[in-house]
Every structure is written in C-alpha cells, then in structure tokens.
Amino acid sequence: MLEYLTRFFDVTVLYYNPNTQPEAEYEKRGEWLREVLAHYPEVKLLDCAYDGAAFDEIATGLENEPEGGARCTRCFELRLRETARRAAAEGFAWFCTTLSVSPYKDAERLNRIGSALAAEYGVKWLPADFKKRGGYQRSIELSRQWGLYRQEYCGCLFSLEQSGK
C-alpha cells in the first residue's frame, strides 16, 4: 500500500492495534513496521502505546464468534474510529486502512465502516481494496525481498487459537 499511496499522498502511518495479543506480539509487529518504514523515509509514524484493554472491552460477549464475524466488525470499528479521530485531531484530509490488503479481510465491510466514520469525524475516507490488482501478491514479494516477519494470525488470541486449528 505504501508503494502505491506515497505516489499520491503524504502518508502518516498510525500504529494502533489494541487487538494484537500478547503485548510482546504488538511490540514485535511495531518493530517490523519500523523496518518497513525504513524503505519509505518520507512516511511518518504515529506510534500508539499498547491498549489491549480497549480490545478486551469490545470483544466481551463475542468470544465464541468465528473469525470474520461480529467480533472482527467491532475490532475494525475500534481501530478505524481511533484512526478517524486522530486524523481529525492532526488535521489530515484523508484516512484509510491497510487491512484490506489481506485476503481474509472484507474490504466492503471496512469501506462501510470507514465511510460512516468519515462522516462522523469530518475526514475523507479513501475507499480501497488493496489486495486487488496484485496488491496482496506484491506485499508477499516485498516481504520476501526485505526478509520481513509475516504473522500467522490476525492479532487477537481468538484468531491465534483458530489459526492453530
């Protein structure tokens, strides 16, 4: 996504993933994000402190949901709400998410949530499905080329459990 987006925008990445568990995994992914950003020196990083309690709160009662279900929708809303809030607070014109590069993420659902939050926060949403037109494959290629860590689960312990099945 950065390869594409930096051609059209000044990009700032918000690292806010309260769903990522355990905290050591959050830190590991943050380190690898900084490794990626080393290839894009023009991209800025807004690094958030770990806030697993925020995810635990929205996931309560949804523990038995399947991967991709209502718990994921709540997680997307949590993460995109913080992105929209920060975009508005920082004076950014646009916001989007990298989540749609994953073949496991529903871009249509992400775009619906993003559009609603754009209206709420007064920041434009960039609708996208970054997995299309070879986007996912390009992310795999760059990961191999740069020797990047690629996680085997979305982030939450529920997805970790399901990935082991």
Image (spheres, helix red, strand yellow):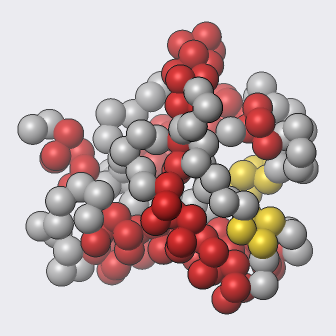
* Image point (79%, 43%), residue name: 5
Q: Is residue 10 left or right of residue 163?
A: right
From the image, which quarter does the N terminus lie in? Answer: top right
User: Can you give x and y, in whole percent of width and height, for residue 131 in the image?
Assistant: 54, 38
Instruction: Pick out the residue farthest to the top.
Output: 145
* Image point (86%, 69%), residue name: 93
Q: Is residue 6 above or below residue 137?
A: below
Q: Is residue 2 left or right of residue 16?
A: right
Q: Is residue 12 left or right of residue 63?
A: right
Q: Is residue 153 above or below residue 76?
A: above
* Image point (61%, 32%), residue name: 133
164 or 141: nearer the eye? 141
From the image, which quarter does the C terminus lie in? Answer: top left
Q: Is residue 90 above or below residue 43?
A: below
Instruction: Pick out the residue farthest to the bottom.
Output: 120
* Image point (34%, 64%), residue name: 72
User: Can you give x and y, in whole percent of width and height, for residue 76 in the image?
Assistant: 46, 66
